[in-house]
Image (cartoon, rainbow, N blue to C red):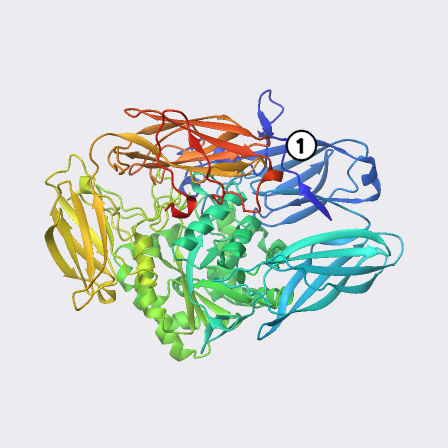
């Protein structure tokens, strides 16, 4: 079907939109309505969403339906609407979806008036608070497409391409095409598939005939041999293009275009995970779907940037937590060689919060699973489906039966990929095995006012405190095996959430079992890797999380001035505070330790615990090991004790201050790659040198104290945007000295003004506890840093950006928005054209995007 964007010219209102001035617009989708809400300490969502409230949101758009559509089929394709959506056409209900993440289609044929104006209204009801354990966004936060086709056409998501065999460099690829015939007579059509290689060269086409009965569908399966196949893998993410055409005689009826990769996938306990016959260990990051300072706006440029940064930090896999991934995310993973575990849901029958997906699971899981697989099938990056996350009812008969049913259905829909279920053995240990008792608790949770997770939160609080060091012993109990073995018997890969303690034991108890660490604490990644890197049956580890996110407020925050433990923090906590990559895309200390632990770097990496908090009490948390940052600029802290962390895969490291030795200490894997030093803070040059056992220096890293001047340093990651309504420019902002060294203690509000062909979509920092939001033009920096994100409009032109802050000279930069037809094939937001120039009189440091960290 002819597919075009349907994202422009929408109007959005909340609640009763008949009130004058209640609507905003026209806006371009995706549009996350929750992002623009005021944070509310009393909202029922609480810390789950960072104290952002929901509501009922109404999106409307009017358009003219051409007369020729009378004899055609018109479909709206929604990639995701959060949530409980209803789609009205000219006031009549035409479709919708309870799930906030499922791809769905609405056929408009019986509702449109051809040759006249028509109105689409989408109602997203996100007023049932709370319905999620993390920030969801509200409304149409993913793209919408209009699809128009004839009575005989290729179904939406109707082309499926898979690698059937690989022999040497010869690949056999299958193409299945689902053809719809809505006409009154049977039709015989020709289906042709043409392929283009990564180098642009055309391959020999394949053609076949297909008979389709009236008012029915039929599928044609074709195979093509590809000689000298360019294989897709994490190291070589080669992509092919397919054009599938349906014709009747000389008349072309429909065309579908797809990208795909040629690769094979196998797994077993002896050899582990293999792609194209080569072993791959998953260095995984669990991620939520929000994009920090722009909320849940799902745009290609945002997904592209996140995957590019994660890949550069050493990750080769992501887990979509805990919902189906967006198409934009999958496209980015295809391009960058990032492997994907795509997850169906966080809840089955038992609620985790009062109004979550458990209310719809029994009725909708099969259709939502079909949507997930239809969305994923042609993406080579997707290697595994997770059919659930920490589903405690899998300890009971009903959950065991459901696990079997869902796994069987998943294999039926897609036999080419692996299946896992991400099980928390401790939760299964304490969960009831009595279905009747579980159902009573479910009913009580849905009708009562208490959080259904209240008792669980109490237990987790205890684990984070007294029992934290005992968790590894607890999960080794025989009862944990008894309460998980039936679940794991039905899946290809056993997903272990926080069960590192069972790896060696279960390798002996279940020698044919393949395990993945589907969720482990990010603070333990390097330690866990030492345990699993030589165990083939453990195919990888997914850190919770690889990228910080809005919601589960404060779960990983090490807060000063208290030792009181809490799993979530009260208002104004905003972010989880996870320790690897912050919401602005800035790599934290843990990220560099992980890189060393994965043997992708030997270090050294130098970081310093905030000297301004030296000696203060701190609330410890198992989710974050350190608050250190790579800075030796602590003005006003002279003489206070500084704790310096040096990470290195080396026999020992030496620390020097202004060329004088502070001391030396052993390092390497036996000490978790960490050497610590304490010294009185004084400004200067702090240098760490890593040595081998025989005294050979293998690396050094220096931190330099800030000196004179306080200024704004603004370094855009890209110079040019496409005028497509969705391209983004990321602009990191720092408070620095005159030489560009960041001043972490010089935080202050910064204001960003934008003029011209783009608008400010979001502005914020990585501060996890703050009363601020991201939808204003002023935000305080955190550790000297902030991030502004601009969104292109639909018109080409110049963009002027002015950044101001008290005590600093204003900085003005100029960007360009160009016509999409004149841009390159580079993906949005890829930093592809760095030809911007500062305004007259402003001096800025300019780096190519390849060098930006």
Question: Residue extending furthest right?
Answer: 185
Q: Is residue 805 above or below residue 131?
A: above
**x and y, in percent, of residue 442 in the image:** 51, 54
Instruction: Judge by depth and name the residue closer to the eye, 849 or 767.
Output: 849
How many numbered circles does the render carry?
Answer: 1
Question: Looking at the picture, how far across and down is residue 411, in whole percent?
Answer: 61, 67
Residue 210 position in % (x across, y down): 81, 63
- Look at the image and tell me whether residue 609 can be seen: no
Give the side of residue 43 with respect to residue 677, left or right: right
Observer-nearest residue: 504 or 833?
Answer: 833
Question: Where does residue 628 sit, x and y in percent of width and height?
Answer: 25, 47
Q: Is residue 169 left or right of residue 150?
A: left
Location of residue 135 with respect to 539 vertically, above or below: above
Q: Find residue 804 and report its image quarter.
A: top left
Q: Is residue 262 left or right of residue 769?
A: right
Question: For mark 1, what is the residue?
Answer: 61
**Label 1 secondary element:** strand
Is 433 above or below relative to 318?
Answer: below
Residue 676 appears left or right of 473: left
Residue 276 shows in this picture: yes
**Mark 1 residue crowding within 10 angstroms, few (<14) / some (14–19) / many (20+):** some
User: In the depicted view, which residue is nearer to us: 553 or 228?
Assistant: 228
- Residue drawn at x 62%, y 39% as measured from the top left: 821
Q: Residue furthest top?
A: 20
Relative to the observer, which residue lies in front, 751 or 823?
Answer: 823
């Amino acid at each position: 079907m002819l597919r075009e964007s349907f994202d422009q010219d929408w109007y959005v209102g909340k609640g009763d939109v008949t009130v004058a001035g209640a609507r905003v617009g026209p806006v371009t989708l995706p549009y996350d309505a929750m992002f623009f809400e005021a944070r509310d300490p009393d909202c029922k969502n609480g810390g789950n969403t960072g104290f952002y409230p929901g509501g009922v949101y109404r999106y409307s758009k009017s358009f003219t339906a051409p007369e020729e559509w009378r004899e055609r089929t018109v479909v709206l394709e929604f990639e995701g609407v959060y949530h409980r959506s209803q789609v009205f056409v000219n006031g009549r209900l035409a479709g919708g979806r309870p799930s906030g993440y499922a791809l769905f289609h609405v056929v408009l044929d019986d509702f449109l008036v051809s040759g006249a104006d028509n109105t689409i209204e989408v109602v997203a009801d996100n007023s049932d608070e709370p319905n999620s354990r993390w920030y969801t966004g509200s409304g149409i936060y993913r793209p919408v497409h209009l699809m128009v086709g004839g009575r005989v056409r290729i179904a939406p998501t109707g082309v499926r391409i898979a690698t059937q065999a690989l022999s040497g460099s010869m690949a056999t690829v299958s193409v299945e095409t689902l053809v719809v015939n809505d006409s009154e007579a049977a039709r015989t059509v020709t289906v042709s598939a043409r392929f283009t290689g990564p180098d642009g060269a055309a391959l020999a086409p394949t053609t076949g005939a297909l008979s389709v009965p009236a008012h029915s569908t039929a599928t044609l399966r074709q195979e093509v041999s590809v000689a000298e196949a360019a294989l897709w893998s994490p190291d070589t993410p080669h992509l092919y293009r397919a054009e599938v055409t349906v014709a009747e005689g000389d008349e072309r009826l429909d065309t579908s275009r797809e990208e795909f990769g040629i690769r094979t996938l196998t797994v077993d306990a002896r050899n582990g995970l293999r792609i194209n016959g080569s072993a791959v260990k998953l260095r995984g990051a669990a991620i939520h779907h929000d994009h920090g300072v722009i909320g849940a706006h799902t745009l290609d440029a945002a997904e592209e940037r996140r995957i590019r940064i994660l890949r550069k930090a050493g990750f080769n896999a992501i887990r979509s937590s805990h919902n189906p991934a967006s198409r934009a995310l999958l496209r980015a993973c295809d391009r960058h060689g990032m492997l994907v575990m795509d997850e169906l849901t966080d809840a089955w029958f038992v609620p985790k919060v009062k109004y979550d997906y458990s209310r719809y699971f029994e009725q909708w899981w099969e259709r939502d699973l079909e949507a997930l697989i239809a969305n994923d099938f042609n993406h080579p990056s997707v290697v595994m489906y997770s059919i659930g996350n920490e589903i405690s009812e899998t300890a009971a008969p009903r959950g065991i039966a459901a696990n079997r049913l869902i796994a069987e259905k998943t294999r039926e829909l897609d036999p080419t990929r692996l299946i896992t279920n991400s099980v928390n053995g401790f939760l299964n240990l304490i969960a009831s095995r009595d279905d009747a008792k579980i159902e009573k608790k479910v009913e009580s949770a849905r009708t009562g006012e208490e959080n259904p997770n209240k008792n669980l939160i109490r237990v987790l609080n205890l684990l984070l405190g007294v029992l934290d060091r005992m968790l590894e012993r607890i999960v080794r109990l025989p009862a944990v095996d008894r309460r998980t073995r039936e679940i794991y018997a039905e899946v290809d890969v056993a997903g272990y959430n926080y069960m590192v303690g069972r790896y060696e034991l279960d390798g002996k108890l279940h020698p044919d079992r393949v395990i993945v660490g589907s969720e482990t604490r990010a603070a333990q990644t390097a330690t866990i890797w030492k345990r699993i890197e030589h165990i083939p049956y453990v195919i990888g580890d997914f850190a919770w999380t690889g990228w910080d996110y809005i919601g589960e407020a404060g779960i990983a925050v090490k807060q000063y001035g208290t030792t009181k433990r809490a799993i979530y923090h009260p208002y104004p906590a905003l972010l989880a505070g996870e320790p690897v990559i912050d919401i602005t895309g800035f790599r934290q200390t843990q990220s560099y330790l992980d890189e060393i632990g994965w043997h992708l770097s030997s270090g050294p990496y130098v970081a310093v615990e905030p000297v301004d908090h030296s000696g203060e009490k701190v609330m410890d948390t198992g989710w974050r090991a350190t608050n250190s940052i790579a800075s030796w600029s602590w003005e006003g802290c002279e003489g206070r004790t500084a704790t310096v962390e040096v990470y290195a895969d080396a026999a020992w490291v030496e620390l020097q201050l202004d060329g004088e030795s502070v001391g030396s200490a052993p390092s390497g894997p036996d000490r978790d790659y960490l050497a610590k030093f304490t010294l009185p803070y004084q400004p200067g040059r702090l240098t760490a040198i890593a040595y081998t056992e025989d005294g050979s220096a293998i690396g050094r890293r220096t931190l330099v104290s800030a000196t004179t001047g306080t200024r704004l340093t603004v370094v855009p990651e890209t110079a040019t945007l496409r005028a497509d309504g969705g391209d983004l420019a990321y602009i990191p902002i720092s408070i620095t000295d005159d030489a560009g060294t960041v001043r972490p203690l010089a935080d202050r509000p910064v204001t960003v003004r934008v003029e011209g062909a783009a608008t400010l979509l979001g502005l914020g920092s990585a501060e996890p506890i703050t009363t601020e939001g991201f939808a204003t033009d002023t935000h305080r920096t955190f550790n000297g840093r902030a991030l502004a994100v601009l969104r292109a409009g639909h018109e080409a032109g110049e963009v002027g950006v002015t950044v101001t802050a008290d005590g600093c000279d204003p900085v003005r930069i100029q960007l360009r928005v160009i016509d999409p037809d004149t841009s390159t094939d580079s993906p949005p937001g890829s930093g592809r054209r760095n030809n911007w120039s500062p305004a007259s009189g402003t001096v800025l440091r300019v780096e190519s995007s390849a060098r930006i960290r």
